Image (cartoon, rainbow, N blue to C red):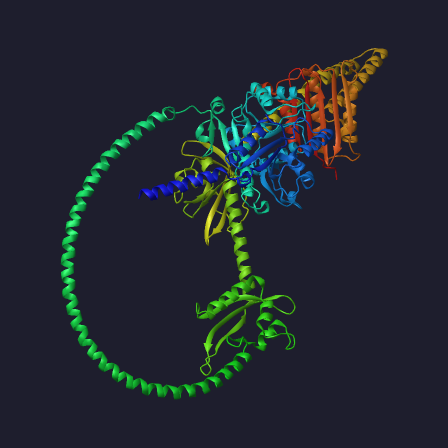
């Protein structure tokens, strides 16, 4: 035994010595080199996060070496720089045997697309951070895959609207770089269209840094900021992500949202954020698969997995946002640890210690009980085996005796059967000879019958490989007798390639005995090139005379059946799509929709109905009147809705809810059919805001009319009244006795006063409706009005009109004339301006007006709070002619008004 141990030890020492002298050439292969080309510079948050994601995957691989290069195109992106950088890379990286190249962001992706075939041919490429990825970007390129970059503006904006329900304006901060800022704007506009929001979006781009910061600092109230990439201002100055975030954070008084993860923890509330770290991880995982032998072309481009809801607890707390309003699964940073999290280790150690003590006690108890049970079971098992063995011996003896008697009886029966079988064999031989002759005749008759029938007949001899297809099959396929060959090769060439393997496998299964009957549907090509669908049935039979096996069967043309099946599938797909569209509209429409049966019980309702009427989720099969007491009167009022009225008339009514809330609503009730049942579809729309707006417009119109009456009364009293009084005196003087000279003087004065009265009446009439506007149109009337005001040298009015020669409709001309005169009068009364600029032009089917002055300006908020009617009158007039009006003003900065009115010409 000792000699064996010595022998083993000696062999072990010899093996160690041999391994010590293994040449270096036998060592493990060299590390696989991976080149990472970043579009931007090291130290940029986005670039560093992608680097960290790549390293989290590849740095754990011992045989991988990463080489990083930075194009620095954020700070340097001109032809001379790129030319020098290309020359540097040519000398620096040309001969390094890279196995994979990873490129991040668009500029690096464009760089590798342009120079890959020259400097890095045949090296697989993995990209990440590529905006607006489309499959055609990879056209003509092989060995490339990657991770696209798609910012989720829709979910971020939807989140902002949910967390800030009173939001009215979102300021979007973006730099002047194209096309990225244009892409962002298009995505935001698309999100606004999908969400159907009325919130105003203002895009701050192509501005200087100071202008942007001043605008941000001025925001307050129901405003929010959506921060994109602001790395270069209008003057081309570079600003890092850290710097622009710090400057905006120090000045912003409203919540800031973004779609970029690197802003998280720096001052933004959060959003659906795109993570550079996750994009780096995903691209590195693709690169690792390529290093392990996968082909880049076989790896699909990854378009998801890098966006997630993330929030900053400090910012949520700052703006009073309830954490329960956040989407499920949201990540929250800077959140204070709970008691459990703070004392996690101590609690864990205590629990583990207690569990270990309990576990030790339980294990000791169970071991003792197990040993006791084992001893009892062993004793019982021993007794059972002894008893069982005794019974088995007795039973065996009884069985042997019985079998002995049975064997004697069986021998006697077998002898009888032997004689009987000999007689049967002789009889069967004679019957088989007769059956063979009949079978031959029957086979010939069956062949003739099937060949003459509507179904095609085929027969295949498995021994001789002879194949026969009846003429009916070839006639259906359009072949003449001299144009086809009854052979397996020719038939295989006609069967559709997608069906050939399945048909052959089914035939082989029948030949091997796995299947008794052959039944397959397959396509076969006709002479003119189109395919027919055939249903083939068959079975293997044997010929009793020579033992040959035949595979025989029939064909049935099922082409029309297949066409009908495809049409049925298409109809079902269209029906499902229609149902999905209905459900989507039902769930997403802003109008409240309820489906009621004849007893006014709720069958279904959409989310808008639950919000409007304060309904809970469990409302099905409950009476609508339980939630809205006033609904009975509403339903009775609309009970005469026609059954065929797809678009019923809308009416206005008032709803009273259980909590006492009373709201005006617009109601439309129609009868629709769902699953062969008639139900009532009730559409409710809260029109509270519309009613308020209508009252404001009506009050403004009444106020304007009242002020016009007061001005007209004042003009009559101040100008026409004194003249008429004087005229009355002169006429009275004429009626009295006096000298001729005195009468002539009174007559002259009366005539002069009458002319002055007529002139004053014309002026009052002109103020009510200028004659020049009625006779000559808008251009002449405005020029005439401005010309009368130019007598004041302290005010310069610049009027620029570019209107067509045609007359516009009366409401448009009167409305625009009153708006311009109202604006000028307001400037003269309140603005203390020295210059007014009025520009009116006709463009693209609309009249556009741009009015501005250099007066003292005012606060829009103060004017709205005080209830000034001048601006309200202007807005009402423009809305009455289907126009849009916008107003800007700031104290000390003057005022500017722009409006646009669609053109209607006089007939």
Q: How many marks can you see?
A: 0
Left or right of 710 on screen, residue 65: left
> Which image quadrant for residue 756?
top right
Report x, y in % for residue 448: 53, 82
Q: Is residue 259 visible?
A: no
Q: Is residue 576 above or below residue 740?
A: below
Residue at x-position 41% and y-position 32%: 659
- 810 relative to 897, above or below: below
Q: Is residue 660 left or right of residue 750?
A: left
Whether 721 is drawn above or below 77: the answer is above
Residue 374: x and y in percent read: 19, 46
Q: Tell me the quadrant of the picture where the C terminus can be found.
A: top right
Q: Is residue 827 visible from the viewing direction of this image?
A: yes
> Looking at the picture, how far across and down is residue 524, in whole percent?
58, 67
Q: Position of residue 820 (x, y in %)?
A: 71, 25
Relative depth, front residue between 518 and 813: 518
């Amino acid at each position: 035994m000792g000699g064996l141990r010595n022998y083993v030890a000696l062999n072990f020492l010899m093996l160690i010595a041999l391994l010590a002298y293994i040449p270096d050439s036998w060592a493990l292969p060299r590390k696989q080199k991976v080149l990472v080309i970043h579009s931007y510079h090291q130290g940029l948050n986005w670039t560093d996060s992608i680097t960290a994601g790549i390293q989290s995957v590849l740095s754990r691989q011992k045989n991988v070496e990463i080489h990083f290069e930075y194009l620095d195109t954020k700070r340097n992106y001109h032809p001379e720089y790129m030319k020098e950088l290309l020359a540097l890379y040519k000398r620096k990286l040309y001969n390094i045997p890279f196995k994979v190249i990873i490129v991040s962001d668009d500029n690096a992706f464009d760089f590798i697309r342009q120079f890959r075939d020259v400097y890095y041919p045949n090296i697989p490429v993995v990209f990440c951070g590529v905006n607006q990825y489309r499959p055609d970007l990879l056209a003509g390129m092989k060995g490339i895959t990657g991770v696209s970059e798609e910012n989720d503006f829709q979910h971020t904006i939807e989140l902002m609207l949910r967390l800030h329900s009173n939001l009215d304006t979102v300021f979007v901060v973006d730099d002047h770089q194209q096309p990225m800022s244009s892409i962002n704007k298009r995505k935001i506009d698309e999100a606004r269209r999908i969400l159907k929001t009325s919130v105003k979006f203002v895009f701050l781009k192509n501005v200087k840094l100071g202008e942007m910061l001043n605008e941000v600092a001025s925001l307050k109230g129901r405003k929010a900021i959506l921060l994109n990439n602001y790395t270069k201002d209008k003057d081309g100055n570079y600003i890092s992500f850290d710097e622009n975030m710090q400057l905006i954070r120090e000045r912003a008084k409203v919540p800031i949202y973004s779609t970029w993860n690197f802003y998280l923890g720096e001052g933004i509330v959060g959003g659906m954020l795109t993570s550079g770290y996750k994009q780096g991880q995903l691209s590195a995982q693709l690169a690792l698969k390529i290093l392990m032998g996968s082909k880049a072309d076989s790896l699909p481009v990854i378009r998801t997995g890098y966006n997630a809801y993330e929030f900053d607890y400090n910012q949520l707390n700052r703006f009073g946002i309830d954490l329960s309003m956040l989407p499920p699964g949201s990540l929250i940073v800077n959140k204070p640890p709970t008691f459990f999290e703070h004392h996690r280790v101590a609690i864990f150690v205590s629990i583990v210690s207690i569990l270990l003590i309990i576990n030790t006690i339980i294990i000791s108890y169970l071991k003792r009980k197990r040993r006791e049970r084992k001893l009892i079971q062993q004793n019982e098992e021993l007794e059972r085996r002894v008893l069982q063995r005794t019974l088995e011996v007795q039973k065996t003896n009884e069985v042997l005796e019985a079998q002995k008697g049975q064997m004697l009886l069986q021998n006697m029966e077998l002898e009888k059967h032997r004689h009987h079988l000999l007689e049967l064999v002789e009889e069967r031989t004679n019957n088989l000879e007769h059956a063979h002759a009949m079978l031959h005749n029957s086979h010939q008759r069956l062949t003739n019958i099937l060949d003459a029938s509507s179904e095609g007949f085929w027969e295949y001899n498995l021994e001789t490989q002879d194949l026969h297809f009846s003429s009916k099959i070839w006639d259906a396929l359009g072949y003449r007798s001299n144009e086809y060959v009854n052979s397996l090769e020719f038939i295989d060439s006609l069967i559709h390639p997608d069906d050939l393997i399945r048909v052959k496998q089914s035939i082989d299964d029948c030949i091997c005995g796995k299947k008794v009957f052959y039944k397959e549907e397959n396509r076969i090509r006709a002479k003119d090139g189109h395919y027919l669908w055939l249903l083939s049935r068959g079975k293997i039979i044997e010929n009793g005379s020579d033992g040959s096996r035949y595979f025989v069967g029939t064909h049935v043309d099922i082409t029309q059946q297949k066409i009908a099946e495809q049409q049925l599938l298409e109809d079902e797909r269209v029906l499902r799509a229609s149902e999905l569209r209905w459900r989507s509209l039902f769930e997403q429409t802003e109008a409240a929709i309820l489906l009621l049966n004849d007893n006014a019980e709720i069958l279904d309702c959409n989310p808008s109905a639950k919000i409007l009427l304060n309904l809970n989720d469990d409302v099905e099969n409950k009476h609508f009147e339980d939630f809205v007491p006033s609904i009975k009167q509403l339903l009775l009022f609309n009970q005469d809705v026609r059954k065929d009225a797809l678009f019923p008339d809308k009416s206005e009514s008032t709803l009273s809810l259980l909590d006492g809330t009373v709201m005006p609503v617009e109601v439309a009730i129609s009868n629709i059919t769902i699953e062969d049942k008639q139900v009532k579809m009730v559409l409710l729309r809260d029109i509270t805001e519309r009613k308020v707006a209508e009252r404001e417009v009506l009050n403004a119109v009444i106020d304007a009319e009242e002020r016009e009456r007061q001005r007209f009364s004042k003009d009559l009293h101040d100008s026409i009244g004194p003249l008429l009084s004087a005229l009355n005196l002169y006429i009275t003087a004429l009626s009295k006795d006096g000298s001729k000279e005195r009468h002539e003087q009174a007559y002259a004065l009366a005539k002069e006063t009458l002319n002055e009265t007529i002139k004053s009446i014309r002026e009052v009439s002109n103020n009510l409706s200028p004659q020049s506007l009625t006779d000559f149109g808008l251009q002449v009337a405005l020029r005439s009005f401005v010309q009368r005001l130019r007598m004041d040298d302290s005010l310069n009015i610049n009027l620029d009109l570019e209107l067509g020669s045609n007359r516009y409709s009366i409401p448009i001309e009167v409305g625009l004339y009153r708006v311009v005169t109202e604006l000028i009068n307001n400037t003269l009364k309140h603005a203390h301006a020295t210059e007014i600029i009025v520009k009116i032009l006709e463009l693209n089917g609309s009249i556009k007006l741009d009015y501005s002055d250099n007066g003292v300006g005012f606060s829009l908020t103060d004017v709205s709070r005080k209830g000034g009617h001048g601006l309200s009158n202007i807005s009402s007039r423009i809305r009455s002619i289907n126009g849009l009006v916008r107003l800007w003003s700031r104290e000390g900065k003057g005022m500017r008004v722009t409006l646009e009115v669609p053109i209607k010409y006089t007939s």
